[in-house]
Image (tube, rainbow, N blue to C red):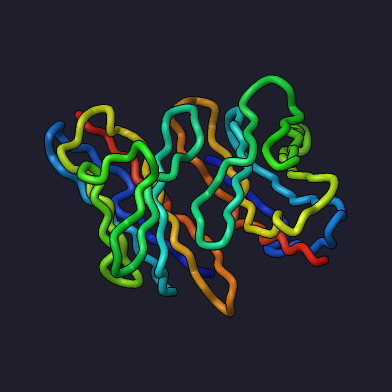
């Protein structure tokens, strides 16, 4: 069984400020971890993913996330927020067995103010 | 919270037959729903965007005649895999957009595991 918890349904930052979106997971087997972004009225886009190897993963649009096994976390960060980053962000986990399905968190809405 | 129900959760069908997957928003109206496909060891692929009362918008490379999408009401979208083949075996997920107070929020179905034998 696996689950994902995203802390905070809404996160507000000022333009230029650090973005930190939290994601904790539980999985009985080694996980693959994903962050997706959804802009208004659009489908999901993959931001980044962790499968194996380096635990610090860089994605598109300046986002990165670090897999911390000891903390069962995969928090998403960006050093400086842009107005265009305002969107909903989803963390997802699946078991690294090639068969299991994705389990999503409930999403975090990122609001960016001028 | 808002709930999206996807049915069936698992289905096995014979090659050449058609399978219908339903996606229902249980406590909100969804003018827009999305259908995704998950390939083994990979992330999701957006197949199409389904808008109530109009034709679905398919992503490049997705066969419209094979993956029929109908969004006949504000709470129901269906994906029909026609003339299924083993390579269509996959995990299909729907997502529905809830528009409340001027902002949209996405909710996901539980997914459907399709196995074509």
In this picture, residue A36 sits left or right of residue B69: right
Q: In this orientation, which residue lies closer to the viewer: B61 or A36?
A: B61
Tell me where residue B70 appears, x and y as whole percent: 26, 59
* A8 sits to left or right of A102: right
The quadrant of the image that shows the C terminus of chain B is: top left
* Residue A23 locus on image (x, y percent): 70, 47
Q: Which of the 4 image quarters holds residue A40?
A: bottom right
Tell me where residue B66 sits by quadrant: top left
**Measured from the top left, where is residue B45 in percent x and y?**
45, 40
Residue found farthest to the bottom: B101
**Identity of the residue drawn at 24% across and 28% down:** B86
Q: Indicate left or right for A30 with A11 as reference.
A: left
| Vertical order, B72 against A67 (above or below) | below
Q: Residue at x 63, y 43 (%)?
A: A35
Q: Residue at x 54, y 32 (%)?
A: A95
| Residue drawn where x is 22% and y is 32% of the image | B116
């Amino acid at each position: 069984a696996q689950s994902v918890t995203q802390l905070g349904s809404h996160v507000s930052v000022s333009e230029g400020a650090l973005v930190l979106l939290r994601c904790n997971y539980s999985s009985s087997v080694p996980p693959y971890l994903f962050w997706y972004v959804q802009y208004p009225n659009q489908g999901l886009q993959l931001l980044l993913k962790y499968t194996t190897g380096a635990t610090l993963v860089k994605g598109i649009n300046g986002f990165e996330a670090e897999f911390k096994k000891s903390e069962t976390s995969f928090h998403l960060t960006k050093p400086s927020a842009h107005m265009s980053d305002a969107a909903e962000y989803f963390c997802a986990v699946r078991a690294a067995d090639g068969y299991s399905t994705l389990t999503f968190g409930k999403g975090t809405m990122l609001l960016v103010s001028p | 919270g808002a709930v999206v129900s996807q049915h069936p959760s698992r289905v096995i069908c014979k090659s050449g037959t058609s399978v219908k997957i339903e996606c229902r928003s249980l406590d909100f109206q969804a003018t827009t729903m999305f259908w995704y496909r998950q390939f083994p060891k990979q992330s999701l692929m957006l197949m199409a965007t389904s808008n109530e009362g109009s034709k679905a918008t398919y992503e490049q490379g997705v066969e419209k005649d094979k993956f029929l999408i109908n969004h006949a009401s504000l709470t129901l979208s269906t994906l029909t895999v026609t003339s299924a083949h083993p390579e269509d075996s996959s995990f299909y997920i729907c997502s529905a957009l809830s528009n409340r107070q001027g902002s949209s929020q996405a909710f996901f179905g539980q997914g459907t595991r399709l196995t074509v034998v």
